[in-house]
Image (tube, rainbow, N blue to C red):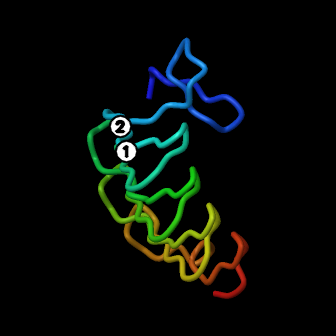
Amino acid sequence: MSDLVKREGIYYQKFTDVPFTGKVTGGEQGSFKNGERDGAWVRYWNNGQLREKVNFKNGKMEGSGIGYHRNGQLAGKVSFRNGKREGAVVAYNEDGTLDKERTGTYKNDKKISD
């Protein structure tokens, strides 16, 4: 990712004007297609723990995602449609207890019920 620059929402390899297509590795791992994130992506905390797994389509989060706290505890499960939370979201605090404020049903990235 450090070899890429983002301009107007599109990623380019440094010193080029061609949208990047290819894979990146390191703290973030995944693929780009025409300068946009595409397919499965994973991110890691600096301590090496898995931070999140999420899918992208046309540069936006799409489908199910899962996140973890720095200590390895599950942070939550969420579904995305066109980059916005959609459907059931379950969130947890670092101690493993349910985060009632963020848990619920979402539509177009807005919480509509508990």
Quarter of the image with the C terminus in it: bottom right
Q: Position of residue 78 (x, y in %)?
A: 50, 71
Q: Amino acid at mark 2?
A: Lys
Q: Position of residue 37 (x, y in %)?
A: 50, 46
Closest to the observer, 50 or 12:
12
Q: Residue at x 38, y 39 (%)?
A: 28
* Residue under pointer 1: 30
Quarter of the image with the N terminus in it: top left
Q: Label 2: few (<14), some or many (≥20) within 10 Å?
A: few
Where disc 1 sits, the SS reads strand
* Residue under pointer 2: 23
Up/down of 81 relative to 94, above or below: below
> How many numbered marks, from 0 up?
2
Q: Residue at x 60, y 72 (%)?
A: 102
CB within 8 Å, label 1 to label 2: yes
Q: Position of residue 15 (x, y in %)?
A: 55, 12
Q: Position of residue 35 (x, y in %)?
A: 55, 37
Q: Residue at x 40, y 65 (%)?
A: 66
Closest to the observer, 24 or 108:
24
Where disc 2 sits, the SS reads strand
Up/down of 18 relative to 63, above or below: above
Up/down of 34 relative to 7, above or below: below
Q: In the current view of this chain or complex, which residue is farthest to the bottom?
A: 113
For this view, does 87 lie left or right of residue 75?
A: right
For this view, does 9 lie left or right of residue 44?
A: right
Q: Amino acid at mark 1?
A: Gly
Q: In the current view of this chain or complex, which residue is farthest to the top?
A: 15
